[in-house]
Amino acid sequence: MQQIINFILEVEKLKGVTRKTRPLGLDRYENSAEHSWQLALLAISLERFAESSIDMNRVVRMLLVHDIGEIDTGDTIFFAETGWEERKAAELNAVKRIFGLLREDQAAEFLALWQEFEQAATTEALFAHAVDRAMPVMLNLATQGQSWRENGISYERVVHRISRRSRPDALRCGNIWKCGCKRPTIKFFSEDERRNVHFLFKKCSRAREQIRHLSSTRRGVGNQKFTTNPTSTTSLSR
């Protein structure tokens, strides 16, 4: 029992790891613990959109442990383009230390779940990755692209990074994007941009092909930065 207490008190520190997105209606940034909780709830809610039968219990368990390593490494913005290999090595060392507080069999189980998520090879891991990619987008669509604007992330980087990492083939997420892109809170996109975003994610299972088409038809726009003016017809945001 003492090992479990030690472990739980250690993972308490995840509440102190801040991310780049602010919770709705709050001035502070969200932390990695509440992010993991929200992902687990979102995954359960989206189970019927899975392309095939999945073990939702396993998905939720993966999501609850996938950011544990950030206790030691801190959070890195999803759009970082360098240093990922070093970061993942550091995270692996971190989760081994933290899971090692538990009994050996429990530590091995949690580590296997963490590694399964990282490898993104199983149906459950792909689903978990898709949910992990969707949540920040949903929050940004509801907050005028807050974290995108604050970190100077361009429209093209958003579309490219989400498609490359979210494995949209694992999740029929068209309905998520369809609802999100109709919200009035995305006025920071021009009419053409809103139409392109809606089209891209409406057909989420074909996202890779659509991104190539989108990139070829948006010359000169992809390099623009997101601005802090939500009413501008040319401003971009996430």
Image: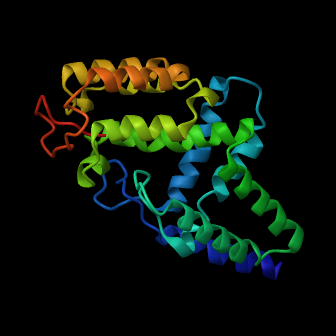
Residue 145, image x and y in percent?
28, 42
Measured along the vertical axis of the image, is residue 149 above or below residue 104? above
**Residue 174 visible:** no
From the viewer's side, name the closer residue of 237 and 209.
209
Q: Is residue 29 left or right of residue 132?
A: left
Give the residue displayed 37% in from the left and 57% down from the top: 20
In front of the other: 43 or 82: 82
Residue 12 placement: quadrant: bottom right
Viewer-closest of 142 and 159: 159
Q: Is residue 69 left or right of residue 124?
A: left
Kindly identify the residue that appears in the image at 38 percent across and 34 percent down: 159
Asked whether residue 224 is in view, the answer is yes
Name the image quarter holding residue 19: bottom left
Q: State the image coordinates of residue 195 (x, y, percent, origin top left).
A: 29, 18
**Residue 172, percent across and down?**
58, 23
- Find residue 218 and report its horizontal and vertical position in percent: 25, 25
